[in-house]
């Protein structure tokens, strides 16, 4: 017994340290799977000790404290955790088999995705958003209404009929993989780098003014905590009802009866999770009948009517071969780590972006190191750490940080460990990346002109500015051996007058921070290009979702005469279609 007590004590200490790193520092030290296994081990050991000795154990608390020093508000119903499993045998033993007697009921279970974000509790009274709380300790949450109300996906007022007077909505705030990449690029200045989409959500929600970034967060509703009026009998119907109120729900929800169907749903998303635009870490299986849910009830940590069936995290070790530095469209130079190629969940990978040189220092990378790569549902693989125990002095070399742009040799500017090429479009890499942006679908969308063609045209010095693209001729294209028909198609497409909407035109200008959604908001506000050219800080501030940083990039862009000249040249080749002009 003394041995068990000692083991329990050691495990609790270990888990508490991991909890601190995860919840307080927002820097997970181990994978979710490793954490869950430790917790499970502790739970098993604690079966041998009396209940009163468990009270202070991490197995008993559902601490999800993201934020300190925020106003604390009690949830109307507790926000509990979810029991979880990683294998189908356990899923059967721990969950499905308990409901054997109901198994012939049609659509007995509901399967959903398990979003990898932050749980949130929204209180609506008479349809109006009153507050938004984090889970906190499960009973009392932290009031983050200010930041929550900046998220577009979260309705400030519910729509439709039949809205209960009091409605406590439960769901997940998450970040798409695309936005995660974007934010890591943007936070470079602050020497911050989020290790996954969940940490990025926590990071933004912790900000006192997340105005600039609020359009990078999304929300899915996955249930109701409290309502004064029953709005549905089944969980699936309840979610559909929530959708009619304007609350976003995931498209990937099924109802089913058999274990086989659940496994099919799980396997499908295990294979296809990388195709989703956001991260998931498993699926959640819930009992569909809400009155049965009520009857089955909860234990101290989690409801007994739901279980998470989680994916194994996908990690492998390999050897770091080299770090190359790549110049992007806006001149930022990003380190890319190349390693001996490995296959993770069927996909061959050989490189990962490091975002900035701080990441090299943080991971303490040396060429020749054995590194652990993770593909956590992300399309973008990540180096999570160096296996230091395998490092040998004779097989590793320091990473050399370049002083000159790898593309054009111009001097590199080092601004707080963020590297910039000091040249602009005279740098081939920057010019090439800008052209790829310019011809892309959301910009000018030039038919038959793709990224590869652009690379060849720039590398072979056939074009050196954007306008050259429109005056390409047969002789120049013949240098690329494309064949007559393709050449003709490209030329016809380039010579035609391009018709693009104002938002696409604005996006094509490649102003820093101005994504397609921001471009659309700007176009909706200014309606014409002439109005946009007269934009100043005051009217830009009136536009939804536009942060100060973006506004300053726009103002700087419009101040430069060469940019106005460029716009005028473009207008000779491009017709802008105006959507909202009164006829
Ligand atoms: S239902 C009483 N459904 O997973 C708890 N949770 O590990 C009911 N999560 O804190 C939760 N996707 O934030 C539910 N489709 C989903 C979910 C989901 C993600 C999160 C949730 C919870 C955590 C538990």
Image: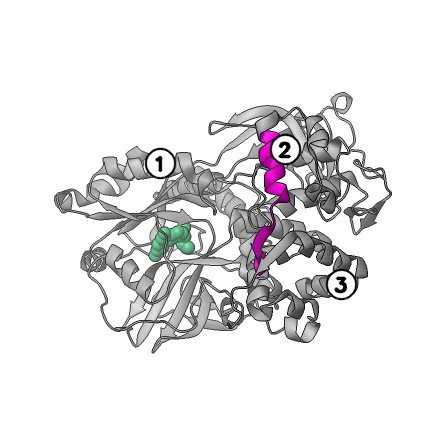
Q: Where does label 2 land, which residue?
A: 452
Q: Choose mark 2 or mark 3, whichever is in front.
A: 2
Q: CA distance from mark 2 to mark 1?
A: 33 Å
Q: Is residue 364 visible?
A: yes
- In the image, which residues are magenta? 486-503
Q: Where does label 1 land, which residue?
A: 268
Mark earlier in primary sequence (2, 1): 1
- State the quadrant of the N terminus: top left
Q: Where does label 3 land, which residue?
A: 556
**Type of secondary structure dominating the magenta stretch:** helix
Color style of the picture: one colour
**Mark 2 in CB contact with mark 3 (< 8 angstroms):** no
Q: Position of residue 271 (x, y in %)?
A: 41, 34
Q: Position of residue 289 (x, y in %)?
A: 20, 55
Left/right of residue 226 with respect to residue 148 in the rendered view: left
SS at mark 1? Answer: helix
Q: Position of residue 29 (x, y in %)?
A: 57, 43
Mark earlier in primary sequence (2, 3): 2
Q: Looking at the image, which residue is at 77% across and 24% down?
A: 393
Left/right of residue 490 with respect to residue 188 in the rendered view: left
Using the image, tell me which numbered label, if any, was put on residue 47: none
Q: CA distance from mark 3 to mark 1?
A: 48 Å
Q: Looking at the image, which residue is at 61% across and 36% down?
A: 490
Quadrant hosting residue 311: top left
Asked if the magenta segment contains residue 428, the reply would be no
534 vs 445: above or below = below
């Amino acid at each position: 017994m003394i041995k068990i007590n000692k083991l329990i004590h050691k495990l609790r200490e270990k888990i508490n340290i991991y909890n601190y790193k995860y919840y307080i520092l927002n820097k997970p030290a181990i994978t979710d799977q490793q954490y869950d296994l430790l917790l499970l081990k502790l739970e098993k050991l604690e079966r041998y000790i009396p209940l009163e000795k468990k009270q202070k154990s991490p197995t008993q608390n559902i601490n999800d404290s993201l934020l300190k020093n925020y106003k604390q508000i009690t949830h109307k119903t507790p926000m509990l955790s979810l029991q979880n499993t990683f294998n189908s045998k356990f899923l059967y033993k721990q969950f499905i088999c308990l409901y054997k007697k109901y198994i012939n009921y049609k659509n007995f279970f509901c399967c959903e995705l398990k979003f990898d974000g932050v749980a949130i509790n929204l209180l609506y009274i008479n349809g109006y958003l009153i507050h938004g709380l984090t889970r906190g300790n499960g009973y009392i949450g932290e009031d983050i209404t200010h930041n929550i109300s900046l998220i577009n996906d979260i309705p400030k007022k519910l729509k439709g009929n039949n809205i209960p007077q009091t409605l406590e909505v439960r769901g997940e705030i998450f970040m798409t993989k695309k936005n995660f990449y974007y934010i890591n690029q943007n936070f470079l200045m602050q020497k911050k780098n989020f290790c996954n989409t969940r940490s990025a959500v926590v990071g933004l929600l912790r900000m006192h003014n997340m105005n600039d970034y609020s359009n990078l967060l999304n929300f899915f509703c996955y249930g109701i905590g409290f309502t004064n009026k029953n709005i549905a009998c089944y969980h699936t119907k309840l979610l559909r009802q929530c959708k009619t109120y304007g609350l976003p729900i995931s498209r990937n929800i099924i109802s089913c009866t058999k274990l086989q169907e659940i496994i099919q749903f799980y396997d499908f998303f295990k294979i296809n999770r990388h195709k989703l635009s956001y991260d998931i870490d498993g699926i959640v299986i819930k009992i569909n009948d809400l009155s049965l849910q009520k009857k089955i009830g909860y234990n101290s940590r989690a409801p007994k009517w739901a279980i998470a069936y989680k994916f194994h995290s996908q990690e492998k070790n390999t050897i770091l071969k080299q770090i190359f530095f790549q110049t992007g469209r806006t001149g930022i130079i990003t380190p890319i780590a190349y390693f001996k190629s490995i296959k993770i969940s069927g996909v061959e990978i050989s490189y990962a972006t490091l975002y900035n040189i701080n990441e090299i220092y943080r991971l303490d990378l040396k060429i020749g190191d054995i590194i652990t790569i993770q593909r956590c549902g992300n399309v973008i693989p990540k180096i999570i750490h160096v296996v230091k125990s395998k490092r040998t002095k004779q097989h590793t070399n320091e990473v050399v940080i370049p002083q000159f742009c790898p593309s054009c040799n111009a001097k590199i500017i080092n601004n707080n460990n963020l590297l910039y090429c000091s040249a602009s479009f005279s740098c081939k890499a920057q010019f090439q990346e800008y052209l790829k942006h310019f011809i892309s679908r959301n910009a000018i969308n030039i038919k038959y002109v793709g990224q590869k063609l652009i690379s060849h045209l720039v590398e072979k010095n056939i074009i050196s500015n954007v306008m050259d693209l429109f005056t390409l001729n047969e002789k120049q294209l013949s240098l690329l051996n494309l064949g007559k028909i393709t050449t003709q198609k490209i030329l016809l497409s380039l010579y035609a007058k391009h018709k693009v909407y104002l938002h696409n035109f604005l996006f094509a200008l490649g102003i820093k921070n101005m994504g397609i959604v921001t471009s659309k908001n700007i176009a909706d506000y200014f309606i014409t290009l002439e109005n946009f050219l007269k934009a100043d800080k005051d009217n830009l501030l009136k536009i939804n979702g536009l942060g100060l940083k973006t506004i300053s990039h726009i103002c700087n862009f419009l101040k430069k005469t060469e940019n106005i000249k460029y716009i005028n040249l473009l207008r000779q080749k491009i017709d802008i279609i105006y959507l909202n002009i009164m006829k």
